[in-house]
Amino acid sequence: MADFVIRPVAELAPAQVADFLRRMFDPVKGAFLADWGCWWHGGDENRFGVLAEDGTLAAYFAITPMQCVLAGAVWDSLWWIDLIVDPAFRRRGLQTVMDDAVRTRPGLKLGFPNEFHSTILARHGWGVRGDLRKQMLPLRLHRVRFVQQAAGWRGRLLRLGAGLARPGLAGLRGWWGRYRPRYTQAWPEATPAALAAIFAQVQAQEDPAGEVMTTQRSAAFFQWRYFDCPYRAELRFYRALLADGRAGYAIARFSDLRGLKSVRILDLYGDFGHQGLLRDLLATIRRDAVQAGADQVIILSSLSSRPGLRTALGAGGFSISVPVYFCWHGQDPPLHEQLQQQPLYWTLADSDNDEPH
């Protein structure tokens, strides 16, 4: 691979990088990365271009430094995101160039590949598992993208079913839109410190040994991920409080992407053993989604942990589920093997699960 060299974006011409991103990614994501990639990845030193011998930008990839809770300790880790190769340079081993650059870095490397990419990563020594699920509550099934875009007989069948479901869903929306919360309130005055305090409280009560691998939700993390983000106005914060002091929170993003009104629950954390608290948080967000005219509500869940949340999602109408793949690479072989069975809890705010726009 002597024809190619990796350079941090900070060393490249901004116009060259912006032009590449806007051409290689779809227009919405390309514009977001061009304008906000420095924030998204925690600095331009975490974004990289792969240059051909003549200086042409042939590929791009980025990492996002983070910390995770694992085996009772906090680990410095990173998400590997947004790798793409210019079609003019494909089949020249650039996937391997970028993979080697990330895989050989110290510490834990984490990511969420699509199904096709996951098979490539497995051949390169990454661990891969597929026990996460993106779950959707359809509020207007006929407007959901996979129903509208499905082709052939399957598409016709889906659209017929969605049409038949419209009266029933309209009735449910009327009922859901009148929900009166028991424990949950909108929390516009939420602060990074207050959110971090709830996370720490839940961790101490439910998982003091750190057995579930998840993001280390510090005040600094909340500040960066939510309070400094360019779409802060689209976020709604919720807090649920029980009489005995137990608590939970949720952060949801209300946005319109390509004509689809979507509510994405970016993070939800609380007493996962209390069905009343979980169902109340979800029902309150569902009520607000109905009142906002949303077409769908989406959340990420895991089959390996938090069974109480899965139960609450089922009761809340999150009836459509698709698998999500998770990958990792660590230079400690026992830890690498441990992650094959490790209970996980990731959310849409982790990595790039919330489609950047």
Image (cartoon, rainbow, N blue to C red):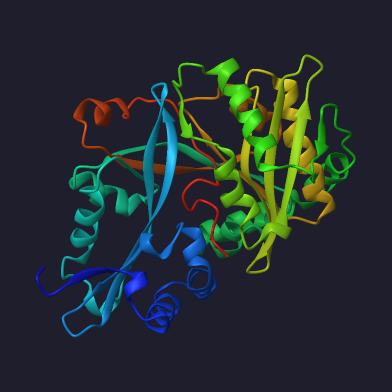
Q: Is residue 135 visible?
A: no
- Side (left or right) of 218 relative to 121: right
Q: Is residue 8 above or below residue 334?
A: below
Of 310 and 347, nearer the camera is 347
Q: State the image quarter where residue 249 is shown.
A: top right
Q: Is residue 190 above or below residue 146?
A: above
Single out the residue that lies furthest toward the left.
Answer: 2
Of 180 and 240, nearer the camera is 240
For the N terminus, the quadrant is bottom left
- Side (left or right) of 348 relative to 115: right
Q: In the image, what residue occupies the spot 30% across and 48% down?
A: 118
In this rendering, the count of numbered labels is 0
Instruction: Point out residue 93 in the picture as x, y percentages from the top left corner.
Output: 16, 65
Of 112 and 226, nearer the camera is 226
Q: State the image quarter where residue 258 is shown.
A: bottom right
Q: Is residue 339 above or below residue 351?
A: above
Instruction: Point out residue 105 in the picture as x, y percentages from the top left corner.
Output: 24, 48
Q: Is residue 239 above or below residue 124?
A: above
Q: In the image, what residue occupies the spot 81% across and 49% down?
A: 290
Q: Is residue 296 visible?
A: yes
- Side (left or right) of 170 relative to 67: right
Instruction: Point out residue 25 in the picture as x, y percentages from the top left corner.
Output: 43, 72
- Side (left or right) of 102 relative to 140: left
Instruction: Point out residue 264 in the picture as x, y percentages from the top left corner.
Output: 64, 49
For the C terminus, the quadrant is bottom right
